[in-house]
Image (spheres, coloured by chain):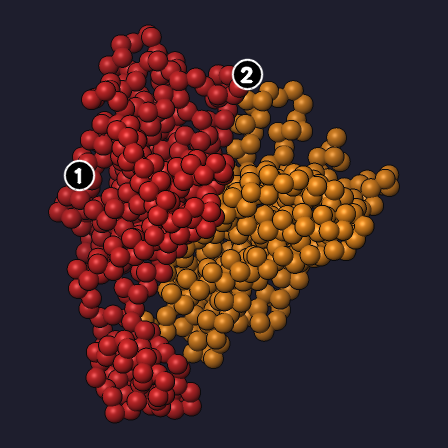
Chain colours: A red, B orange
Amino acid sequence: MSNMKNSARTLKEAKEPLFHLVKRQQISTGKAWAIRIGTIIFSILFISVLTSIVFRESPFEVIKYMFEGAFGTNLRVNVFFRDMSILLIIALAVTPAFKMKFWNIGAEGQVLISAYLTIVCMYYLGGKVSNGALIVISLLAALVGGMAWAVIPAIFKALWNTNETLFTLMMNYIALQIVLFSIKVWMPAGSGQLAPLPYGNLPHIGGGDYVTSIIVAIIITLFLFVYMRFSKHGYEVAVVGESQNTARYIGINVPKIIVRTLALSGAICGVAGFLIAAGIDHTVSIDTVGGRGFTAVLVSWLGQFNPLAMTVMSFVVILLTIGTTNVMVNSGVANDFFAEVSTGVAFLIIIICEFFIRYNIKFRKRVENDHPAVPDNQQQAELQEGGTAHIEDENEIGSEEVE
Amino acid sequence: MIAAFLKSAIRLSATFLFGSTGEIIIEKGGHLNLGIPGVMSVGAACGCIAEFYMVRAFGTSAPFMLLAIPILVTLLTGALMGLLFSFLTVTLRANQNVVGLAMTTFGVGLAGYLITKMQSQNFIIITRASKFYLNLFNLAGNDNWFVKIFLSHGILVYIAIILAIVVQIILSKTRVGLNLRAVGENPATADAAGINVTKYRYVSTCVGCAISALGGLFCIMDYMGGNWEYILEGYGWLSIALVIFTMWRPALAIPGSFIFGGLYILSSYIDGVTFAQMEIINILPYAVAIVVLIITSIFGKKNVQPPAALGLSYFREER
């Protein structure tokens, strides 16, 4: 250990870098969330300016259009919260797997296959059994479909450590092909689109298809919060995620936890697929999920696996998607892809922000200054003065090594 | 019929070959870049836009400009995307999977946006440049079956194959390749041995992304004949899967991409299948990828495993 330090010192004398990064030892949760919320507001403003440049509108008009598009009428408010709920449910679904460091990027396929199985039930049983029974049957089918699509990769991961990222990714495409196949069987000629089916639709609560999704999203959020935070299952998931060796050592059956967690993940995706198919679209196509499975992965990760933060993230994503689309409509430019670009940019901004929460940039300092907390402007001044050796840094390295 | 099938399979395979050769370079350095679909889309979009301006400026009278400038623009765009990826993952230490997915969202969206914007102009003129991609070293017209299948392709197909071989040699026979593999297997050891991990990861990611982006340009300008279609996202994901198929060896990526290309177009070459049955046959490339994935993980010896540090960021301070 001391050898290493010595060699580090000689290196430093030779060349002191302009700045170096120090992992923040302590940042208060409040401050971290303040930075995050600040970033989210910044990213919305940034997208607004970007949009205003692209569509040649004033930034204020853009923000006005964005919020009008999202909340302008009662119907829009309902659609907004419905879309947000669906995205949130999918994001919640992938969260337990991520906590376990199981990189499930197959939410797209898991949701699609369950939406598809819902429609299969509606197509073949519609009119033959009562609506209530049909809803139950199709919900079960959706759950089984979502679970199967998640559990199959999980079994191979648990037994042979098969790469789950690519496995789940390929499962997406298999689901897609199955949907394409069925649509061509059902609609051999014509538009290639299945018209909305009148059977087995979820009853409208409060006069629309919005309330059901919102209620389900709230229930799942609460359930998952309790499950991850207070249940034994949630604890086991956290341990497996931190260290599989530790988990094995304390007697946790790791393969069992992996498969069980992914079954839960898939089941929640199944609920999302069921809501989309039976509650909203009443039909299925290859665009049924429309990339929401991938977006949800980012929502979950950038929301720090925290259900509340994930709610905020889904809010932002849907605001940007619906908002920029409305700006586009109002400025008469037809370009469907701008919403995707703006979401992508917002994600990248938030990723950059995470860095500033985790790390502190320290610039070169003078020898005599070994006081850790230096305000930013002072650092800047010191940077201009220049500096040579570095005592504080040695201390910090030492303290990290002890950890 | 069989000759035509093999010819098409080899032609399409260049898209996968560029994509997976690029991703192999990236993964050998320890980065799992899920942004390849985005990189391919943006690269192809910028290349096609460069092509548009070249055709508008020179018509079809300057084949060299029509080939060189778009290829250069594509490589540059790909490298820039790689730079973004490495800046976020190496310098800003973000999670690689998250950055990759965000780049795919961003890239596919940006490509679609740019192309939609261009299509309001006379974008279709880029199809005129397509023949230069096809004809440069094309020996079609010769009746020999070998020439028909293997030597009647556009120039980028040959470049893809040569590139894969060159990358294989660099990876397994040179010091640079050895260092890169060391960085991907155990960055801490590589660092201790005096290899600049940051530099290797930056450069390998930029080079890999540039090569992958070329796959996008090939797909649009050669395979699609200059007609833009929103298909690159799927091809990008398949290229990533192909990396596993080839067990991280560019030389194996050549036959691997032939097989993938063949499976991808197989349904159009079987007589008497309905459109619905075609969709079931189209599951094959994905199913085969899964089977290979499972087999290599069950019977995997050490030399068919992914680089040990794949997907893990390296920070010297956190050892």
Q: Name the residue rendered at 66%, 55% in the picture.
A: B71
Q: Which of labels 1 and 2 is toward the front?
A: 2
Contact flag, marks 1 and 2 (Cβ < 8 Å): no
Q: Amino acid at mark 1?
A: Phe
Q: Quadrant of the C terminus of chain A?
A: bottom left
Q: Which residue is nearer to you in this view: A267 or B109?
A: B109
Q: Is residue B73 above or below residue A328?
A: below
The percent coordinates of residue A339 (x first, y second) are 42, 42
Please provide percent x and percent y for residue A224.
Answer: 20, 41
**N-term mark: 1 or 2:** 2
Mark 1 element type = helix
Instruction: Categorize mark 2 by other alpha carbons within 10 Å: few (<14), some (14-19), many (20+).
Output: few
Residue farthest along the left direction in this orientation: A230
Tag shown at residue A394: none
Query: Which percent across, then down, holds residue A174?
Result: 47, 34
Q: Examine the rendering and report whether any part of residue A89 can be seen.
A: yes
Mark 1, other Cα within 10 Å: few <14 / some 14–19 / many ≥20: few
Residue beneath the point at 53% across and 19% down: A191
Q: Which residue is mark 1?
A: A223
Position of A43 compared to B151: left or right?
left
Q: Subunit of mark 2?
A: A
Q: Residue at x 23, y 20 (%)?
A: A207
Q: Amino acid at mark 2?
A: Gly
Between the residue at mark 1 and the residue at mark 2, the CA separation in whole angstroms equals 44 Å
Location of mark 2 (residue): A190
Kindly identify which chain the residue marked by label 1 belongs to. Answer: A
Which secondary structure, mark 2? loop
Q: Is residue B190 left or right of residue B43?
A: left
